Amino acid sequence: MSRPAEAARVARVEEGLAPISVPGETPKHLSLPQWMELYKVPGVSIAVFDQGKLVWAKAYGVKQAGGAEPVTIDTLFQAASISKPVTAMAAMHHAEKNKWSLDENVNDKLVSWKLPDNDFTKEQKVTLRRLLSHTAGTTVHGFGGYTVDAPLPTTQQILDGEKPANTSAVRVDTVPGTLRRYSGGGTTIVQQLLVDQLKKPFPLIMKETVLTPLGMKDSTYEQPLPASLASRAASGTRADGKSIEGGWHVYPELAAAGLWTTPSDLARAALEMSKAAKGQSKRVVSQAMAKQMLTRQPESKSFGIGFLRNPGQDWYGHGGANEGYRALLVAFESGGGVAIMTNSDNGSRLFERIVASAISVYGWKGYTVEPEHPSVTVDLLTRTKGTDVAIAWFKARKTQAPKDEKLTPELLNELGYSMLREKRLDDALKLFEANVALFPEDANAHDSLGEGYVAAGRKAEGAASYRKSLELNPKNDNARKVLETLGAATTK
């Protein structure tokens, strides 16, 4: 396709973002920079691929909140959990090359560390397939990273939850193969397995196995980010629009969260999977293995091996959320898709509009664009009309549709925490108070209101809310701990 024709498509994607739909008002279209300003997202980088090739990449905004240096298509972002499917590509390459069974006990391959057996692993074992499809029964959902000046734990300290690790030990607490539960801890076990078997540092394994063969020249799993690359990196941004101290957090959980990259490089990884599945390439995995990786695993139902495969939809990919960064990769076996990277905790609020617009322009099939969720409407109303209007809309909607399963206490709760993160304490309290009024029997709503009151220095009211939460849910250890800290009795 000619450059003018592709430029026209780029413009159509940019102009096709779904408008703000405020009830009772004419829909209002915003440009991507205007959406970024609304959500306090400093920088966005996008790559689009179609018919088996990268067709365009474009960057918007700045590398650091309040700064002037622009994001370019070569600017590095943290891919966060999109690190996992790229790790899976390497793991499956070496499983094929070394004839590892995907279904054998991983302890047979682990050398320097072993996953402790317990009653849950007596009959069913933790396997490579289960670890990469999140069905191994392993704990630790995700990781918060470490400030740039903090001591970093070794992989074994992370796995055992030993200081300076800031997460608990990775263990099995349910029978492997019985349910899907997302586990970054499980992917960290895969990291240890690869290092044990190949006797090389993990970043080197990834460079030799995936990054270099696929021409992902702007990608690295090195953590901390080498000084030679730091000047090219976008700084992470919190929800309130302020930069992460030191620019970003460091993630020694390399396999699960450690990839620094660009949307164009993520596109190259996705395109390789598409080509491999068609038998057009075997630079990383064979056609048979690629098909396995892109097939929903029976025990998971929403994951292939490494890649997200939602039921009823035909795209593969993954999302990513590290401190100060959000990213998304959506790809189709036809060879099309989009990669989006942002340097903001609010970046994911842009994703659905960008993906939906790209799908409309390029005609990709297999991704369901959902109707705007009430949480999006409430959030937009809060940002454009104020919290009182947003709460009034929610109350009216709940009266009109009392059986709407989307109108949950979690919706207002999450928005309340969003306001807390943005240092909008008065708005957060309004949301938490409304939530308690609407859902008086929800223990978590009272717990969150208690947190809001304590943050506002209203400790007596906070204690009362925590007591109510504990009354509704006697197992709420958080409420009990906070009450002890406040010096308040757990009963009236």
Image (tube, helix red, strand yellow):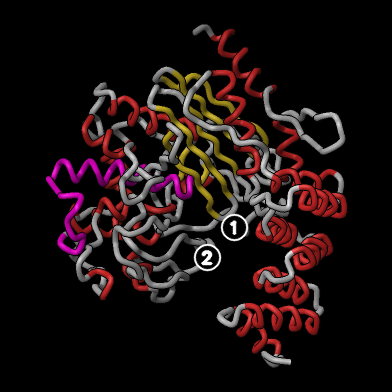
Residue at image point 62% right, 50% down: 345
Is residue 255 visible in the rendered structure shown here? Answer: yes
> Along the line of sight, which residue is nearer the eye, 210 or 413?
413
Task: Name the spot of residue 128 as percent of width and height, x first.
Answer: 25, 53
Whichever of callouts 1 and 2 sits on the residue coming sooner in the sequence is 2
Q: Which residues are magenta?
A: 79-108
Residue 466 part of the magenta-drawn span = no
The amino acid type, in three-letter code, at marker 2 is Asp
Task: Name the spot of residue 260 as percent of width and height, x first.
Answer: 46, 45
Tally the numbered discs.
Answer: 2
- The circle on residue 246 is 1
What is the residue that sits farthest to the left in this orientation?
Answer: 99
Left or right of 291: which side holds 86? right
The amino acid type, in three-letter code, at marker 1 is Gly
Image quadrant assignment for residue 218: top left
Secondary structure beneath disc 2? loop
Secondary structure beneath disc 1? loop
Residue at image point 53% right, 53% down: 322
Is residue 382 visible in the rendered structure shown here? Answer: no
Q: Residues within 10 Å of mark 2 (few under 14, many from 20)?
A: few
The correct choice, above or below, for 427 with respect to 309 in the image is below
Q: Are marks 1 and 2 in contact (CB under 8 Å)?
A: yes
Task: Name the residue tied to disc 2.
Answer: 149
The correct choice, above or below, for 393 with respect to 282 in the image is below
